[in-house]
Image (cartoon, helix red, strand yellow):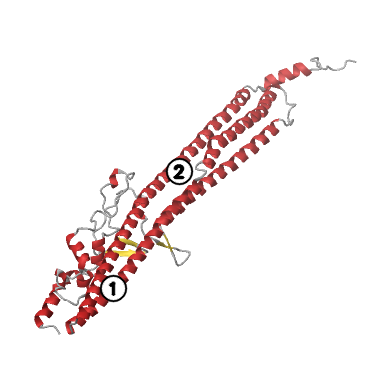
Amino acid sequence: MWDSQTRQSSLRSLEWSPLRREKRARLSSFLLAGKATCRLRAGGTMSTRPPMRPPGNVPAVLLGFRPALALTGALCLQQNLGSSSPSKRQTKENTITINCVTFPHPDTMPEQQLLKPTEWSYCDYFWADKKDPQGNGTVAGFELLLQKQLKGKQMQKEMSEFIRERIKIEEDYAKNLAKLSQNSLASQEEGSLGEAWAQVKKSLADEAEVHLKFSAKLHSEVEKPLMNFRENFKKDMKKCDHHIADLRKQLASRYASVEKARKALTERQRDLEMKTQQLEIKLSNKTEEDIKKARRKSTQAGDDLMRCVDLYNQAQSKWFEEMVTTTLELERLEVERVEMIRQHLCQYTQLRHETDMFNQSTVEPVDQLLRKVDPAKDRELWVREHKTGNIRPVDMEI
C-alpha cells in the first residue's frame, strides 16, 4: 500500500485539467480529460469558423451571413455532453436537433436575420420538415418546393391543352362559317338589298378566313411555346431532388455516427469514473494501470466524438449551401415560368384584339351597302326590267 503522500501525489496527477478541481468524480471532468480538454481550452485544433458559409454563386446579400444551423465541435461537445460550470448546467441548451438537422433553440438563441428580408424567398422558409397530411411521416421543406415546381409544370401543360381546345373551336367555327357562306338561301334577292345580302354572305367567308388565321397564330405563338417550355423539366427536377436527398442522407449518417460516438464516450467515462472511485478507496499498481488505460480510451473516445461532430457540421454546411443555392434557383425558375405564361397570355389577348379588328373590317362593307339600300330605286330598277306596259285600261264605250 502507498502512503498518504504517495496517494495524494497520484490523485494530483489526475488534476491537470482545471475542470477536475471542483469534483473529481464528476463525469464531465473525464469527458474533457487529455487532449480533448487541451483542444477545447486552447482552441487549437477545432475550427471556430462559421460552419455554414453561403456558396460563391449566392447573391452578395447573403455573404457574411453566419447561420446557427450547425455548431462547431467544441460548442457541440459543451452543450450535449455537459460542462463543469454549475451556472451552465442550469441553463438550457442553445440548439435542438430535429430529424438530424440542428437548429437554434427557440428559448435561448436570438432570432435569426432572414437571408433575404422582405422578399419571402424560398431560401428562408423551407429548412424544417413538415408533417405529411396523408401519413404519419414528414415531408422535407425542399420536397414541398419541388412539388410546387412540378405542379407549375402541370399547370403550364393544362393551359396549353386549354388553348388547343380554343384552337379547335376556332377551326370548327371557321369551317362552319365558310360552309354557311356558300348557302343559297335568299340568293334571288334583287336590287340594292340583294347586293347587301350577298355582301353579308361574303363577309362570313372573310370572317372564316380571319378565324383560321387566328387559330394558326394561337398554335404557333401560344399553344406550342407553352407545351415545349422546359421539355426536360421533370428530369432536371428529379436530378435536383436526388442531389439534395443524398446530402440529407449523408447528414443523417453523420448524425448517427455522432450519437454512436457519444454513447461510446459515455461508456468510457463511466468506466473511468468507476476505476477512479476504486483508486480513491484502495490503491494498487493494477488499479493505477487500469485507470491510465481507461483514461486513454476515454480521451480517444472524446477525440472520436469531436471528429464525428466536425464531420457532421461539414455535412450540414454542405447541405446548407446546396439548399440555399438550389432554392434560389427554383425561385428564379418559378419567376421565369410565371413571366413566360404571362407574356404568352398577353399574346393571346393581342391576337384576340386583332381578330376583332379584322372581323370588324369584314362587316364594314355590309354596313356601307346597307346604308345605300333604297326601296324606291330598287322598285324603279325592277319595274324597268320587268314592266309589261304603262297604258292603263279605260271604260268600254257603247
Question: Sequence-wise, which precedes: disc 1 or disc 2?
Answer: 1
Vertical relation: 319 (above or below) 187: below
Taking the spot 73% from the left edge, 30% from the top edge, the residue there is: 186
Closer to the camera, 112 or 203?
112
Q: Which residue is mark 1?
A: 266
Secondary structure beneath label 1: helix
Taking the spot 48% from the left edge, 51% from the top edge, the residue there is: 238
Q: Determine which quarter of the picture holds residue 133.
A: bottom left
Is residue 381 something that shows in the picture? yes
Q: Determine which quarter of the picture holds residue 175.
A: top right
Closer to the camera, 348 or 226?
226
- Determine crowd level at label 2: few under 14, some 14-19, many 20+ residues with C-alpha closer than 10 A: some
Taking the spot 68% from the left edge, 23% from the top edge, the residue there is: 195
Quadrant of the image containing the N terminus: bottom left
Residue 266 in the image: x percent, y percent?
28, 73
Secondary structure beneath label 2: helix
Q: Determine which quarter of the picture holds residue 386.
A: top right
Q: Which residue is mark 2?
A: 337
How much space separates mark 1 and mark 2, taking CA atoms? 54 Å
Disc nearest the viewer among 1 and 2: 1
Taking the spot 23% from the left edge, 56% from the top edge, the residue there is: 48
Q: Amino acid at mark 1?
A: Thr
The total number of labels drawn is 2
Residue 353 in the image: x percent, y percent?
52, 33
Q: Amino acid at mark 2?
A: Arg
- Determine crowd level at label 1: few under 14, some 14-19, many 20+ residues with C-alpha closer than 10 A: many
**In this picture, residue 278 sits left or right of residue 357:** left
